[in-house]
Image (cartoon, rainbow, N blue to C red):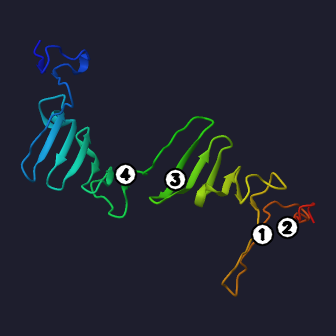
Amino acid sequence: SGRLMIGTTAASTLASSDDLTISTSGSTGITLFSGTGYAGNITFGDGTSGDDRQRGLLQYHHSDNSMRFFTNAVRRVTIDSAGRIGIGTDTLDSSAEVSITNAASSARVYMKSADNADCSIYFGSMNDAATGAIRYDHSDDSLRFYGYNNNEYARILGGALLVNRTAKYASSSEKLSVNGMTSIQGSSTSTAPLYVFNTESTADGTVQPFFFLHDGNGIR
């Protein structure tokens, strides 16, 4: 059948991977020794000429001690000697652990979770288990922002920015709702630091922008 078996007389029963079978009673491995400055390669091809000879490639290059992954004969992922990862680029940013490049279009990271769960990015330090986070929660389709010790400080819900609260306070039409002292400061002597607009209008101009002041007992 042309199959090669080392350390065993039984080939793998996985039909797609039975051409070479190596068996031992402990840890098993294959070592590739390459010259200094050269690469060790495991190549996947489907033809005998051009790029078909190496459509896929796992390569460790001793010139810079990087691990490289190729698909469709193009280098896609690089892990450099410091453990940094480059996706779509072999020029890794020294200030980042992961560099992502798409030279032809937008570069994006896409996360999916269960319908009643969330997608989150956590921020922590080696010596402190408390974390901050950015989270999209599918339970109410809100984007949430967490500070130290995973305390929520703001969320965007239904097109409104909620600061230090988890729901709109007085009206479903609120676009900004803040719980706590708020300060607005401007540094210009010619322009105001806060503008309030109402883009709706009536023939007699009676619809005007307004403020609601609420003391907990009702709108004043």
SS under mark 3: strand
- Name the residue beneath numbered marker 3: 122
The residue most toward the top is 1
> How much space separates mark 4 and mark 1, taking CA atoms?
41 Å
The three-letter code of the residue at mark 1 reads: Val
In the image, taking residue 179 as reference, residue 11 lies left or right, namely: left
SS under mark 4: loop
Choose the circle earlier in sequence order: 3 or 2. 3
Residue located 8% across and 45% down the image: 34
Figure check: 16 above or below 198 = above
- Name the residue beneath numbered marker 4: 102
Q: Quadrant of residue 96?
A: bottom left
2 vs 1, front mark: 2
Figure check: 92 above or below 210 = above
- Name the residue beneath numbered marker 2: 211
Q: Nearer the viewer, residue 198 or 180?
A: 180
In the image, taking residue 98 as reference, residue 125 lies left or right, namely: right
> How much space separates mark 2 and mark 1, taking CA atoms?
9 Å
How many neighbours does mark 1 have within 10 angstroms: few (below 14), some (14-19), or many (20 or more)? few
3 vs 4, front mark: 3
Q: Are marks 2 and 1 in contact (CB under 8 Å)?
A: yes
